[in-house]
Image (cartoon, rainbow, N blue to C red):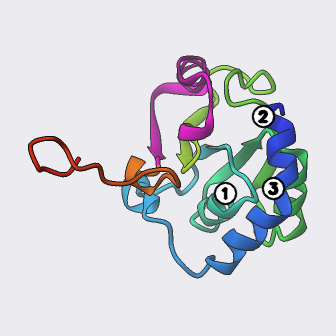
Amino acid sequence: MGTNRRYEAIADWYTELIRARAARRPDIFELIGDVVSQRVCDLACGEGLIARHLAERGARVVGVDISRRLLAHARSIQQTSGITYVQDDAQGLAALRDAVFDGVTCNLALMDIADLDATAAAVYRVLRPGGWFVFSVVHPICAPEAGFVLQRDGTLA
């Protein structure tokens, strides 16, 4: 199943999960800092949680996601002006011009993107000189198949 089809298939479930936890403020904002009047790209924005928080803090936001269905969910509850949603692949960002963003965020999504080199190049291309890129990823121990393994020397790894 292609990446886009995979996200389309889980869009409703994912949106419900995120909205059920919406009262929690994502830790990524500690790293981002002040965004007033900044132009920010929220990469792999999903249903728009981070994009909405950025706009509420005064940023002009472009939320990008590969899933048309997740973007429809984002648009359905857009309560804050200053957000534009664009369907695009993070590995190329073909719909975005060069050097237009002060910053790019990517919250809990890079680990699900196949070509990180292409994604990093696309992020670099859309950032203005001196721009910032703040991202978070899930710690590997949180993966569903992760667990501790007892080593031959008796230690856990």
Instruction: Identify the residue shown where x is 9% and y is 43%.
Output: 153
Q: Residue 3: which numbered mark, if any?
A: 2
Q: Which residue is mark 1?
A: 51
Q: Which residue is mark 3?
A: 10
Check residue 134 for magenta coloring: yes
Coordinates of residue 33 in the picture (x, y in percent): 41, 57
Q: CA distance from mark 3 to mark 2?
A: 11 Å
In primary-sequence order, the first of circles 1 and 2 is: 2
In primary-sequence order, the first of circles 1 and 3 is: 3
Q: Which residues are magenta?
A: 111-137
Coordinates of residue 10 in the picture (x, y in percent): 81, 55
Check residue 150 for magenta coloring: no
Check whether the beta carbons of the residues at disc 3 and disc 2 lie within 8 A of each other: no
- How many residues crowd mark 1 within 10 Å: few (<14), some (14–19), many (20+)? many
- Callout 1 secondary element: helix
Residue 86, visible in the rendered structure = no
Q: Looking at this view, is 10 or 94 the one in front?
A: 10
